[in-house]
Image: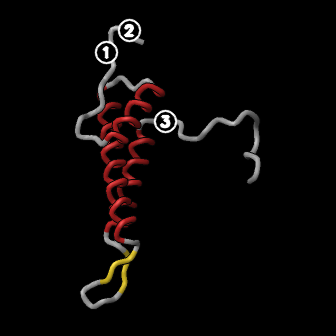
């Protein structure tokens, strides 16, 4: 590990929550290379987009009426799903271990 590397700051266009998660992942997994930082930024942008969609869906509901008055899924449910998928794909690209470590072999208790 190069000790001359300055800690990277999260991109300013990310939300406070996105910046906090960016910092946590950066420090926890010691992401230092430019490609890794770009992928991390992409993941956090998708995270922010997902959170924005979730906030609007929470306010407006899971279903909305179309022009004929028929109920249908809120259009942002697609954005939420796709953003979550993009975030998870970016995390996989970083080879992050997203599973919590177990203290013993076998299935976790309660499953």
Left or right: 28, with 34 as reference point: right
Left or right: 111, with 100 as reference point: right
According to the image, label 1 marks what residue? 6
| Residue furthest top in the image | 4
Numbered disc in front, either 3 or 1: 1
Residue visible at 35% across and 73% down in the picture? 74
Report the Cα–Cα distance between label 2 and label 3.
22 Å
Label 2 crowd bin: few (<14), some (14–19), many (20+), radius 10 Å: few
Residue situated in front as seen by the camera: 35 or 48: 48
According to the image, label 2 marks what residue? 3
Residue 34 percent location from the top left of the image? 29, 27
Residue 105 percent location from the top left of the image? 76, 37
| Residue furthest front in the image | 59
Labels 2 and 1 touching (C-beta < 8 A): no
Q: Secondary structure at mark 1?
A: loop
Q: Secondary structure at mark 2?
A: loop
Residue situated in front as seen by the camera: 74 or 93: 74
* 29 is higher (above) or lower (below) than 17: above
Residue situated in front as seen by the camera: 36 or 12: 12
Labels 3 and 1 touching (C-beta < 8 A): no
Task: Tell me the quarter of the picture where residue 104 sits.
Answer: top right
According to the image, label 3 marks what residue? 96
Residue visible at 38% across and 35% down in the picture? 20
Residue 96 percent location from the top left of the image? 48, 36
Q: Quadrant of the C terminus?
A: bottom right
* 83 is higher (above) or lower (below) than 107: below
Q: Give the mark nearest the N terminus, 3 or 1.
A: 1
Task: Tell me the quarter of the picture where residue 33 sits.
Answer: top left
Q: Secondary structure at mark 3?
A: loop
């Amino acid at each position: 590990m190069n000790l001359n590397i300055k800690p990277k700051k999260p991109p300013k266009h990310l939300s406070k929550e996105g910046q906090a998660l960016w910092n946590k992942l950066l420090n926890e997994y010691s992401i230092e290379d430019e490609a890794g930082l770009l992928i991390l930024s992409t993941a956090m942008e998708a995270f922010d987009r997902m959170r924005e969609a979730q906030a609007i869906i929470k306010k407006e509901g899971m279903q909305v009426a179309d022009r004929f008055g028929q109920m249908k899924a809120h259009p942002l449910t697609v954005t939420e799903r796709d953003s979550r998928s993009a975030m998870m794909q970016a995390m996989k690209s970083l080879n992050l271990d997203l599973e919590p470590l177990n203290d013993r072999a076998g299935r976790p208790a309660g499953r």
